[in-house]
Image (cartoon, rainbow, N blue to C red):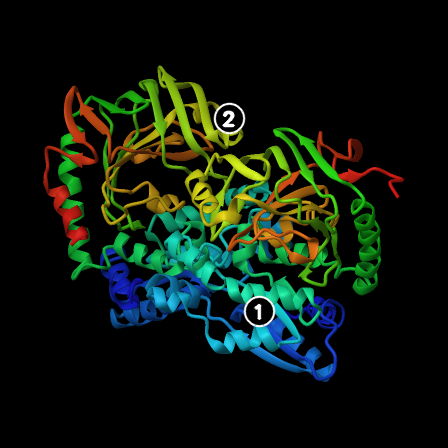
């Protein structure tokens, strides 16, 4: 793809998202299809005087491990990988799968096992990121596979992805910086509230958020970005939620998911499609029945569902919650091998109350809150 | 290798599907993703003293055409295309998509308009030998909800390329289907019974066609056009289908005097209702088919495979095929599949002839299945 948007994207990822500086060890994790973008990132990292380190996964390596590897091999964490997570100053992950359903026929038990095995790496990653020792960003390079999942041609999907990153703007970094400032004000205000109640068609859910931190997401860890999240108080999630969009897990699609919570735990779960998988995921470990994250999607340049969480959870006018692990920086303490985001559209007939007062209506925060 | 072997595949296409003769010009259309098969075909055609004419489209080329096409391109065709269709002995289309949803954003009216304009080219091609087949790609695997290698292995089994002698396997299937056609051609009335299904159709005087893999590779079905006013009862289709790129699942239809009088779907009901409103013929049946390919053991979201699943029947709303004697006219032809493998019976004039996916009068079809299992 001869596209100056790629150069811009590389510039945003290296200079803005991760702030690469001289001497940094920059680990780039990617798939072969992302080569055009990775080449641009590589050049930008060199220009910053840092040390790029490239790990290119084969499309089928993970699938083959899960299918043909023995349990010891699935559980194994190579010390080289551990060293990267422990020592990198910056990690840029560029996802570019060619078949979004590649893991569909893999045994879910083995998939869950692999997730559990990687839990120590995830912990190191989160700990170092919270401590400011690691700047890490994840992005998606458009492929025919993700385009097809979104029901689009590759060209349409490229336009969608670059629009979502504000890369069609003359100065994307300035725009992300300005958005970030607004998100931070919102976060400070939400940080003073004790309860959030979401009311929509099929949904009436109350979450305790007292003394939790709301994290504004302005393109530093996900790109594109645009959300604000917290970790609700673990014992204070009550009510029902019906997710308007399908959830995907390991290439499998689950639709019409409904969850009922009591004192923070899922007490009832159903789905129109994929209910069996949903119930199995809830059994993964103790934390999988808890809400690790609650968030509002704030990216107004993303308006449609495309079947990829990175984009779907940021759709402006939606909320999402994640079953499983919370992010320590939010104050949440749920531990789990699972972190599964489920998204609910609030753009029509919805209200959100903070401490009993309407603060959000039909997908937008009301004017003059703060 | 778990996918289709390009050389065996090319030999099957050249010797069974097209029966290529020395000196023939053979037109082959596909995408660059089918390169392994295209190169094997080139050699196979040359070895048979034929002329291979490879027409290979680039990634993004088809979408690019629809994006940039002017009125001239939608209302006509290049003269060379017609000359090519008229000057060649056979044509082969190999589906090898890079993105099965690449045209989702194109107005169907534009593609339909161009299809109308290209009708002379299509007719010229259909007067000669032709065949449609597939080469497995990651996009098609994704559409099927399968890992790429699993899908490639599935295609290999569906085309009998896992057999020692694929051509002999297809000839056997043809013979067994001929026996089935022979039995069915004496039938006046067909009744299908399964859970949620009790449908009666008249096929008196209609012709059953033996679809033996020469025009569709894979094939494995026999079909006819039921009498347009005969369908009575109800039927539930448990295999999803995607007529306009949107998946429709759990369709239930009720017929009276051949016409759909009530219709609903668990998912995609709006698509179903819109399709039924296409024209008068869209509410009547144009095809009754029986799938006999036991190398195809599951639906993959592509009708070329799904309607041939061994042990299923399918009915199409809309247009019938004239060679069956069917007279239904419609812009629609929507194949819907009813799985009879676990619980289903088909009666011909009151006599049970199919049970749980197996033809009772002619045990040879089950031999096909056991050969696949082995």
* Chain ID of residue with mark 1: A
Judge by depth and name the residue closer to the eye, A55 or A84: A84
Q: Is residue B286 above or below residue B128?
A: above
Judge by depth and name the residue closer to the eye, B152 or A78: A78
Q: How many callouts does the rendering have?
A: 2
Q: Position of residue B189 (x, y in %)?
A: 22, 21
Instruction: Place residue A110 in its image quadrant.
Output: bottom left
Q: Position of residue B60 (x, y in %)?
A: 56, 60
Image quarter of the C terminus of chain B: bottom left
Residue A215 seen from this side:
yes
Which residue position is annotated with label 1?
Answer: A34
* Chain ID of residue with mark 2: B
The label shown at residue A23 is none
Q: Is residue B192 left or right of residue B256?
A: left
Kindly state the secondary structure of the residue where label 1 is placed.
helix
Residue name at image x 21 percent, y 35 percent = B357
Q: Position of residue B215 (x, y in %)?
A: 30, 49
Q: Is residue A83 left or right of residue A207?
A: left
Labels 1 and 2 within one chain: no
Measured in 3D between alpha carbons, the distance from the residue under mark 1 to the one under mark 2, in whole angstroms, is: 42 Å
Residue A257 seen from this side:
no
Which residue position is annotated with label 2?
Answer: B273
Image quarter of the N terminus of chain B: bottom left
Kindly state the secondary structure of the residue where label 2 is placed.
helix
Q: Is residue B205 left or right of residue B102?
A: left
């Amino acid at each position: 793809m001869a596209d100056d948007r790629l150069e811009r994207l590389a510039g945003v990822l290296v200079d803005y998202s991760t702030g690469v500086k001289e001497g940094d060890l920059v680990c780039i994790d990617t798939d072969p299809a992302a080569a055009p973008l990775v080449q641009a990132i590589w050049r930008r990292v060199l220009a910053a005087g840092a040390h790029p380190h490239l790990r290119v996964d084969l499309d089928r390596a993970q699938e083959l491990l899960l299918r043909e590897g023995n349990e010891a091999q699935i559980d194994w964490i190579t010390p080289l990988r551990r060293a990267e997570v422990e020592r990198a100053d910056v990690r840029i992950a560029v996802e570019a799968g060619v078949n979004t359903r590649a893991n569909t026929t893999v045994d879910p038990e083995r998939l869950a096992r692999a997730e559990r095995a990687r839990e120590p790496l995830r912990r190191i990653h989160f700990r170092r990121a919270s401590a400011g020792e690691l700047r890490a960003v994840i992005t998606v390079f458009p492929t025919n596979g993700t385009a097809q999942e979104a029901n689009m041609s590759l060209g349409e999907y490229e336009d969608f992805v670059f629009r979502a990153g504000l890369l069609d703007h003359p100065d994307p970094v300035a725009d992300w910086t300005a958005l970030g400032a607004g998100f931070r004000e919102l976060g400070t205000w939400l940080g003073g509230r004790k309860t959030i109640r979401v009311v929509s068609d099929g949904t009436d859910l109350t979450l305790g958020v007292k003394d939790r931190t709301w994290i504004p997401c302005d393109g530093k860890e996900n790109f594109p970005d645009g959300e604000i999240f917290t970790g609700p108080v673990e014992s204070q999630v009550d009510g029902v939620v019906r997710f308007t969009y399908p959830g995907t897990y390991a290439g499998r699609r689950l639709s019409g998911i409904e969850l009922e919570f009591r004192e923070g735990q899922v007490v009832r779960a159903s789905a129109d499609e994929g209910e069996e998988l949903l119930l199995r995921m809830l059994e993964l470990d103790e934390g999988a029945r808890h809400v690790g994250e609650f968030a509002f999607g704030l990216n107004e340049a993303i308006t449609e569902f495309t079947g990829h969480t990175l984009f779907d959870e940021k759709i402006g006018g939606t909320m999402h919650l994640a079953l499983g692990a919370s992010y320590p920086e939010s104050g949440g303490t749920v531990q789990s091998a699972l972190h599964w985001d489920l998204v609910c559209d609030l753009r029509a007939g919805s209200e959100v109350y903070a401490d009993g007062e309407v603060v959000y209506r039909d997908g937008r925060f009301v004017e003059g809150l703060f | 290798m778990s996918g289709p072997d390009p050389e065996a595949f090319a030999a099957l296409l050249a010797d069974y599907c097209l029966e290529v003769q020395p000196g023939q010009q053979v037109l082959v259309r596909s995408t660059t993703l089918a390169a392994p098969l295209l190169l094997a075909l080139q050699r196979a055609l040359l070895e048979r003293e034929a002329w291979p004419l490879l027409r290979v489209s680039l990634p993004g080329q088809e979408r690019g055409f629809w994006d940039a096409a002017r009125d001239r391109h939608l209302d006509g065709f290049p003269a060379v295309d017609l000359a090519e269709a008229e000057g060649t002995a056979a044509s082969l289309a190999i589906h090898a998509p890079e993105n099965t949803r690449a045209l989702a954003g194109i107005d169907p009216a534009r593609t339909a308009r161009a299809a109308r304009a290209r009708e002379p080219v299509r007719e010229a091609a259909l007067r000669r030998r032709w065949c449609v087949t597939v080469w497995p790609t990651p996009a098609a695997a994704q559409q099927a909800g399968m890992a790429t290698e699993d899908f490639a292995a599935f295609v290999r089994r569906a085309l009998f390329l896992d057999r020692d002698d694929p051509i002999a396997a297809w000839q056997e299937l043809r013979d067994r289907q001929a026996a089935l056609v022979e039995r069915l051609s004496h039938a006046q009335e067909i009744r299908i019974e399964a859970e949620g299904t009790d449908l009666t159709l008249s096929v008196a005087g209609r012709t059953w066609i033996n679809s033996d893999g020469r025009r569709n590779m894979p094939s494995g079905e026999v079909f006819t056009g039921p009498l347009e006013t005969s369908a009575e009862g109800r039927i539930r289709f448990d295999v999803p289908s995607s007529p306009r790129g949107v998946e429709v699942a759990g369709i239930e239809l009720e017929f009276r005097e051949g016409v759909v009088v009530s219709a609903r779907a668990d998912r995609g009901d709006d698509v179903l209702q819109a399709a039924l409103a296409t024209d008068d013929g869209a509410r009547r049946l144009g095809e009754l088919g029986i799938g006999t390919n036991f190398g195809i053991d599951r639906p993959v979201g592509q009708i070329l495979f799904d309607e041939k699943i061994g042990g299923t029947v399918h009915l199409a709303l809309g247009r019938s095929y004239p060679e069956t004697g069917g007279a239904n006219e419609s812009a629609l032809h929507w194949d819907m599949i009813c799985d009879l493998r676990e619980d289903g019976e088909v009666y011909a004039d009151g006599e049970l002839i199919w049970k749980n996916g197996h033809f009772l009068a002619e045990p040879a079809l089950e031999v096909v299945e056991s050969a696949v299992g082995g």
